[in-house]
Amino acid sequence: MAALAWCALVLTGAAGGAVAAAPCQFEPIGEGRVAEITDARSFRLDDGREIRLVGIATEGTDKATLKAMLSGQDVTLRAMDDTPDRYGRQAAFAFLGASEAPVQALLLAQGQALVSTEIGEKDCAAALAAAEAEARRAHKGIWNDSNVIKNAESSGDILAGIGRFTIVEGKVLSVRQAGATTYLNFGRNWTRDFAVTISRRALPAIEAAGIAPKSFENRRIRVRGWVEGRPGPRIDVQVAAQIEILGDN
């Protein structure tokens, strides 16, 4: 079902329109047989290469689903860049057989992952977001837990997840500039309540996406990223894809 849903995403939507290329079909960087699952989004091939599935976060999940899906299977790898990370792993999209849906999309549609913010290519990012939304609507996997998305007013709950990839929703009460940082404040106590930070270095990329941080004031947003404590809970926003506007109230 997830693969069928993914294929539907490549249609133009126009009557009789052509079918576009499937999302996330970047340059091939190799193939191989999966020899070992090392964690919920990483595996080792039989030639020794270590692969990290790019574009997703797997907080709150274990490696059982990936193991059932990939152990002993042949995969094709695609990526925009084949440079290994500092741990020697290659970040890539993995494809099983002739499937046009990457393994990432299958995990997202089963509720076994969250969309991270590493993918800048618009169509691929949108397709991954749609797969996550499908699982959220159906309460699959981690989405069967109502606490996956944190309430911005529950600072303690957010702060308990320091160092973890987290999604937070709430109303932005104020937007303030302090030095080289823009703060989206969700509470009145700036040292205790949850806030989103945007550095001066990241601001041009945010504004280039048509987003003015000041426009978030008094609006409900959903933000995703890694939680820091400085001293209250913070998520640092570096790309526009980390923020989703939910409404005005």
Image (cartoon, rainbow, N blue to C red):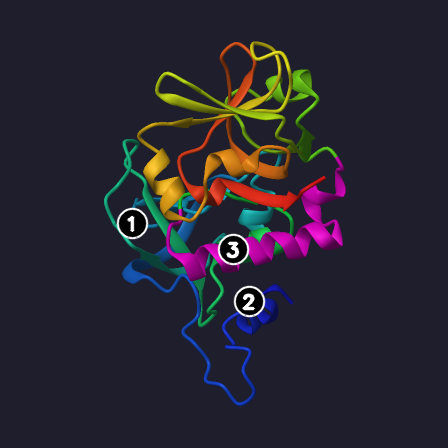
State the mark number for residue 128: 3
The part of the image, by quadrant, that contains residue 232 is top right
Chain-order first, disc 2 or disc 3? 2
Judging by the rendered image, the residue that carries numbered circle 1 is 47
- Quadrant position of the N terminus in the picture: bottom right
Kindly give the residue lying farthest to the left in the view shown.
83
Which residue sits at x=61%, y=38%? Answer: 221
Q: Dot 2 surroundings within 10 Å: few (below 14), some, or many (20 or more)?
A: many
Mark 1 and mark 2 in contact? Answer it, CB < 8 Å.
Answer: no
Going 64% across and 53% down the picture, which residue do you hit? 133
Residue 134 within the segment the image draws in magenta: yes
Say whether disc 3 or disc 1 marks the residue closer to the N-terminus. Answer: 1
At mark 3, the secondary structure is helix
Residue 209 visible in rendering: yes
- Mark 1 or mark 2, earlier in chain: 2
Q: CA distance from mark 2 to mark 3?
A: 9 Å
Residue type, numbered disc 3: Leu
Residue kind at label 2, given as amino acid type? Trp
Residue situated furthest bottom in the rendering: 16
Quadrant housing the C terminus: top right
Query: Which x, y percent locates residue 166?
Result: 57, 32
3D distance between C-alphas at marks 1 and 2: 30 Å
Residue found at x 35% / y 58%: 77
